Image (cartoon, helix red, strand yellow):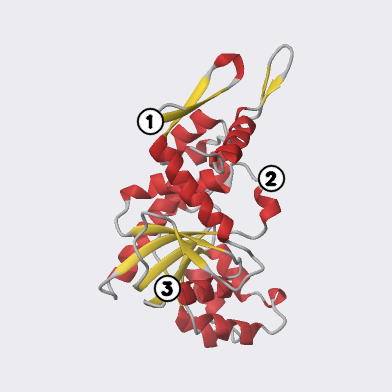
Amino acid sequence: MSGSSLCYSRHMNKSVCMSRPVLLRMRRIQALLDQLNPADDPRALLVPGSPQPRSDVIVMPGTFNPPTGAHIALLKEAYNYIRQQHRSIRLYAAFTVHTVNKEELERPLLLDRVLLLQNVLRRLPHTGILLINQGLYVEQAQGIRQSFPAVRHLFFLMGYDKILQVLDPRYYQDRDASLAQLFALTQLLVVPRGNGGKQELDALLQQPQNQPFARFIHLVPFSHQYRDVSSTHVREGSPLGSLDTPREVKAFMRKTRAYAPPIQTRDRQIDYYRQRMDMLNTLMHKQM
């Protein structure tokens, strides 16, 4: 390893180099991920470089695999919506860590996804990333409240498809008690998704069983052009996924081949991202 970068070899003697600052940043992020245990009480950690959560915050949980132009547009619209009512707003994308074993199977690694999202979010002021050890919204709210007591108003940002799940009694033993616990901690910002817009949300909230919770759920206006954009489309390389795909994501996909199939040569198969995964798993705990 040189004084400023580290290089690792790939097939045909090609090398990929990583600067020392990037490696150090990745190690700090990995150290945080290693602290998150789903068996512990709800907990949230702040990725280095993110603003400290306080006052009023909007949190958008997701896998961000990968981040899309729709994610960026969604955060901007939510900020503008809440900014009309609150003086100070900070935005956060949030990753949840469910099981350690699952992380070993996911492509790309959660470490890579956090770093990529951090690069994408640099274009948005007052924006950071949270890492949370629980997956349910009420658990995430508890983790944020307990870890950052200076937070006053907490808003979760989600698509219309998610609010359907939140209100669906099939996911609860006692739905109303669980929702009361959730809305004691947070409010929900819902954006149109697919065919679910204002009319559909109004009809959902007017149902008698949902009316007691309607005041905690707010529709955020969102451009129709983004309603069907998804990370799946980006991973699959579909034309819809190319809509305003962040340049950082395009560069990451070209460089790492994280979503590309292995290359078949005459005598063997080459999985470049698997090589990167092996390299990162080694570097995260190797002496520098």
How many residues crowd around disc 1 within 10 Å: few (fewer than 14), some, or many (20 or more)?
few
Q: What residue would you read off at disc 1?
A: 4
Earlier in the chain: of badge 1 and badge 3, it is: 1
Q: Would residue 187 be seen by someone viewing this image from the given angle?
A: no
What whole-number distance in Å separates the C-alpha atoms at marks 1 and 3? 36 Å
For the residues labelled 1 and 2, the Cα–Cα distance comes to: 31 Å
Please give the name of the residue rendered at 39% of the width and 46% of the height, measured from the top-left corner. 120
Disc 3 residue type?
Phe
Query: For numbered disc 3, what is the local secondary structure?
Result: loop
- Work out whether mark 1 precedes mark 2 in sequence or the reverse, and give the earlier one: 1
Q: Position of residue 124 (x, y in %)?
A: 32, 53
Describe the element under mark 1 as helix, strand or loop. Answer: loop
Amino acid type of the residue tagged 1 in the rendering? Ser
Q: Which residue is mark 2?
A: 105
Residue at coordinates 64% horizontally, 33% vertically from top-left? 274
Report the Cα–Cα distance between label 3 and label 2: 31 Å
Q: Mark 3, residues whose alpha carbon is within 10 Å: few (<14), some, or many (≥20)?
A: some
Nearer-N-terminus badge (3/2): 2
The residue wearing badge 3 is: 148
Q: Residues within 10 Å of mark 2 (few under 14, many from 20)?
A: few
In the image: residue 155, left or right of residue 36: left
- Depicted 251 relative to depicted 201: above or below: above
Q: Residue at x 38, y 53 (%)?
A: 73
Q: Of the residues tagged 3 and 2, which is closer to the observer?
A: 3
Instruction: From the viewer's perspective, tell me whether residue 239 is left or right of residue 83.
Output: right
Eyeballing the image, is 31 above or below 277?
below
What amino acid type is highlighted by mark number 2? Leu
